[in-house]
Amino acid sequence: MDNGRDLTFAKYLALVRSLGSSKNGVFGLKLHYYQFLELSEKTAGISGLRDLPPGEVLKRVYPDARYIWLTRHDKVCQAISFLLASGTEEWWSIEGAPVAPRADAVRVPEFDAAAISRAEKMFRDNDAQWEAFFAQNQIAPLVIRYEDLAADYANQIKKVLAWLNVPQALTTTVPPPRLRRQSDHRNQEWLNRYTEEGIPPAAVDAAEAGPVKKAPKAMPVGWKQWTGQSKFLGTPDETILEIVAKNGYSRELAAEELRGINSNPFFHGVLRARQGLRKGAALLNVLGKLAQLDPANTVIEKRTGVSREEFRDRYYAANRPVILTGLMTAWRALTAWTPDYLKRVAGEQLVEVMTGRNSDPRYEINCAAHRAEMNFASYVDLVFNGGPTNDYYLVANNRFFERPGTQPLLQDFRAFPEYLTETQTGRMAHFWFGPAGTVTPLHHDTSNILMAQVTGRKRCRLIPAAQWQYVYNRESVFSEVDCENPDLVRFPGFANANVIDFVLQPGEVLFVPVGWWHHVRSVDVSITLSFTNFVFPNHFTWGQ
């Protein structure tokens, strides 16, 4: 249908929405970036939309839209697929669908390195523009990468369904995709040739590019950042050059980056400010080495009947962990929180859960993209019947007890008045609930915490706060080290860390001091309550 001739664009939009909506009223729209840019022009004749930028048009036409951003990490392969599809006009292939006869012969496109380079740049620019649009409009899209979709189609679809609050999303059976993968030997041949022959500058037109010359690999942004960080930390230039060369990039590129850093006045201004930071870091390093000598940092005490004053002096003020026993003996939750009870009391409440964690190694950093809502009864069944997994977990940041339907569960336990302010328990109690296999990676918290283990066991690993230099913390509160399988080649300093390894049992309460690094894995189906509402000061300023 030619909407420009047969319908106004307003009527065309209304018809598309009507015909494209499912029985439950869900309407989905796929929008490429070039189509996004055309929205202002196409809606210019619609009252209320004239002269609006594309982003504002989207908000006016679809005010309640939720955004799924399908992107691809490998932009070179994306560019090659795009050019092959453009040349053959074969944009998709559906299993079992008849192939329409072609009157003209299919033209096999010729390899063109400059065209690949321009397409790669176009896709990178498009991603940057989408990212800017989301940021400017405070939109947190669900990010799906093509590579993940191709490798694990069913779980990625479940992730989308859960994010859209579709009931039983994580237990549904996902049929195989109808679309067939079109990549073939031509894609691989073009990729090999493009890699071997080099990349002409994307801004140069193919007609002007001349013969394609072999060029060194460009240094990625991540390596540029590493180079700058290494300079800041005082790593010798020759060491930086050697490490970069060992990772497949030319010394010439690295030397050029170093020259740029060394001549930058901003960098020299930063170096002047570094002295004060070094003093503080040096002190922490000394404390970290002294902590290695303290036998208290190799085991954790288990105590009963600790008074408020002793807890404050021996553990809280001393920044020392302890397991407290006998505090939960009167809790109804210890015996009452069975699957049937949880579903009967709060099963109808819609709750937020972190999902799709297995497909994202940075699931904690990218937590906003993993939030999904579902009926609590459905989640209870999923946890108790789904087997061990780290793919879904209801965590503190899901704010379980802020949901009205969960409030009756607050009557099943009582805060520890010896250490906590009872008036804030409902607001300050945090609920952790997941299957065996859920993992909270190595990190530190910015306040002191009490962890009360209600159901199941958790294996905990703690490292003293002063040993921060051994855990490779480069982003937020998280360590780069896999605490369960540390790579001591990449992270040799971790071998010096005092790791206290133990299993927290039901009925035990763990005090995790502020700044202490901890890694937690659920051994069984687990329910944990954590608290931060101490009667002692517990608000600290951190620089992340």
Image (cartoon, rainbow, N blue to C red):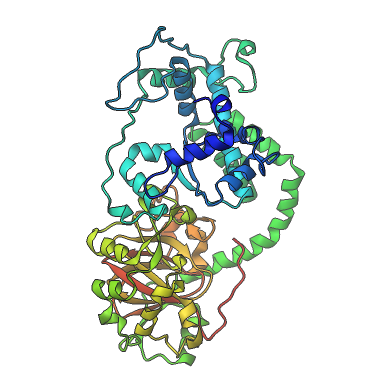
Query: As displayed, is residue 151 above or below residue 528?
Result: above
Q: Is residue 297 visible?
A: no
Q: In which quarter of the image is the C terminus?
A: bottom right
Left/right placement of residue 260 relative to residue 528 reads: right
Q: x, y (%) of residue 42?
A: 62, 32
Work out whether residue 193 or residue 109 is closer to the camera in this orientation and state it.
109
Give the residue at x 53% y 25%: 2
Q: Can residue 150 be seen in this view?
A: yes
Left/right placement of residue 291 relative to residue 277 reads: left
Query: As displayed, is residue 30 above or below residue 341?
Result: above
Numbered label tally: 0
Left/right placement of residue 357 relative to residue 72 reads: left
Give the residue at x 72% y 57%: 273
Work out whether residue 440 or residue 275 is closer to the camera in this orientation and state it.
440
Q: x, y (%) of residue 495?
A: 41, 58
Q: Which residue lies furthest to the front in this view?
A: 6
Q: x, y (%) of residue 444?
A: 48, 66
Left/right placement of residue 499 relative to residue 32 reads: left
Q: x, y (%) of residue 393?
A: 36, 61
